[in-house]
Image (cartoon, rainbow, N blue to C red):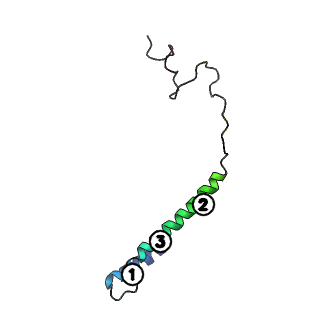
Amino acid sequence: MLAALNVLEALSVSAADDPADSKIGPGLLAFVVVAFLAVATFLLIRSMLHHLRKVPPAFEDKEPQNPQTDTPAGPSGSPRDGDESGPGVG
């Protein structure tokens, strides 16, 4: 990868020296970068789809984590609103 960047840098430097004598247009570096990003995006999407095929279509509900308590816990793990045994009562 580093060697490719060195080559691209050398091409851009030689193009910047005298644009009239250069056969390389100003858009070559941009084209190479865009082409690299397009190929990388394609490979990432292909990999993502491969991993998504391994995911089951539906997840089964597991049993409650704390079956000893009668009142289910709220999102923060504390008892639901209206429970008189919670903090701040008294």
The image's mark for residue 25 is 1
User: Which residue does the image show at 64% across and 28% down from the upper left?
Assistant: 64
The dominant secondary structure in magenta is loop
User: Which residue does the image show at 53% across and 65% down from the upper left?
Assistant: 40
Which segment is the magenta one?
A: 72-84
Depth-wise, is mark 3 or mark 1 nearer the camera? 1
Element marked by disc 2: helix
Question: Label 2: how many residues lie within 10 Å, few (<14), some (14-19) or many (20+)?
Answer: few
The image's mark for residue 12 is none
Question: Label 3: how many residues lie within 10 Å, few (<14), some (14-19) or many (20+)?
Answer: few
Element marked by disc 3: helix
Percent x, y for residue 66? 62, 25
Residue 24 among those drawn in magenta? no
Distance between the Cα atoms at labels 3 and 1? 22 Å
Percent x, y for residue 5? 45, 73
Q: Is residue 61 above or below residue 83?
A: below
User: Could you tell me the amino acid type at mark 1?
Assistant: Gly
User: Which residue does the image show at 46% across and 69% down from the upper left?
Assistant: 34
User: Could you tell me the amino acid type at mark 3?
Assistant: Leu
* Label 1 or label 2, whichever comes before in sequence order: 1
Tell me the quarter of the picture where residue 22 sits: bottom left
Q: Is residue 61 above or below residue 28?
A: above
User: Which residue does the image show at 56% across and 60% down from the upper left?
Assistant: 44
Percent x, y for residue 89? 45, 13
User: Could you tell me the amino acid type at mark 2?
Assistant: Arg
Distance between the Cα atoms at labels 1 and 2? 33 Å
Q: Which residue is mark 2?
A: 46
Depth-wise, is mark 3 or mark 2 nearer the camera? 2
Q: Which residue is mark 3?
A: 2
